[in-house]
Amino acid sequence: FRALWTLNNMAAGNKPNQDAMRVAGAVPQLVDVMGHATDKNTVQATLCTVFHLAQNNTANKDAFKAAGAIEILVKHATKQSANKNPEIALCALHVLIDGHPENKAKVESLGGDHLLQMVAEAEPHTTVTSGDGASVL
C-alpha cells in the first residue's frame, strides 16, 4: 500500500501529475483496488488517492464516474466502520461532485437527499495519516 501513498502524494495539488496518472491508466486501476481491497489500510490509501486525483480536475472527475467509482465510494461512505474510511469516502465524493452536476446527480440517484447532505457536510480537509505518519488529506 506504500505505492498508493506515493501516488496520493504525487497527485495532491499537482494537476500535471493528476493528468499524467489519468492518461497512464491509473483511474480504472484505483477503482478496481477500491472495489476489491479488504485491507483497511489499502482501502484508506486508495480513497485518499481518489480524493487527490479528483481535486480541482474535471477530466479526472469524469474518468472516475465512467470507471464506476461513485457507486463504490457510496458503498464505502455508508459502511459502518470504526476507522476513518467512511469519512474519507464522503470527502472523496464531496470532491467528485464539486462543480460537477452529473456526478452530483449520480450520487443523489444512489443515496437520495440524505446521502447528498452527508457528502455536503463532509470536511474535505480531514487529517489522515499513513502508517509512516505522513499527512495525506
Image (cartoon, helix red, strand yellow):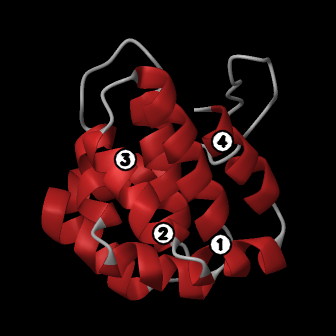
Task: Determine whether, in the image, residue 94 is placed left or right of residue 20.
Answer: left
Residue 10 sits in quarter: bottom right
Residue at (78%, 48%) from the top-left corner?
9
C-beta proximity under 8 Å, tags 1 and 2: yes
Judged from the image, the secondary structure of the residue bearing numbered disc 1 is: helix
Q: Nearer the viewer, mark 2 or mark 4?
A: 4
Q: Is residue 58 visible?
A: yes
Q: Earlier in the sequence, mark 3 or mark 1?
A: 1
C-beta proximity under 8 Å, tags 3 and 1: no
Residue at which label 2 appears: 27
Task: Determine whether, in the image, residue 40 is placed left or right of residue 128.
Answer: left
Residue 103, position as x, y percentages in the image: 36, 77
Q: Amino acid at mark 4?
A: Ala
Residue 21, position as x, y percentages in the image: 65, 72
Per the model, the C-alpha gap separating discs 3 and 1 is 16 Å
Q: Earlier in the sequence, mark 2 or mark 4?
A: 4
Q: Amino acid at mark 1?
A: Met
Judged from the image, the secondary structure of the residue bearing numbered disc 3 is: helix
Q: Nearer the viewer, residue 95 or 40?
A: 40
Q: Which mark is residue 21?
A: 1
Q: Which mark is residue 3?
A: 4
Q: Amino acid at mark 2?
A: Val
Q: Nearer the viewer, residue 68 or 23?
A: 23
Q: Amino acid at mark 3?
A: Met
Per the model, the C-alpha gap separating discs 2 and 4 is 15 Å
Residue at which label 3 appears: 34
Q: Earlier in the sequence, mark 3 or mark 2?
A: 2
Judged from the image, the secondary structure of the residue bearing numbered disc 2 is: helix
Q: Is residue 37 above or below residue 70?
A: above
Residue 56 sits in quarter: bottom right
Q: Nearer the viewer, mark 4 or mark 3?
A: 4
Q: Earlier in the sequence, mark 1 or mark 2?
A: 1
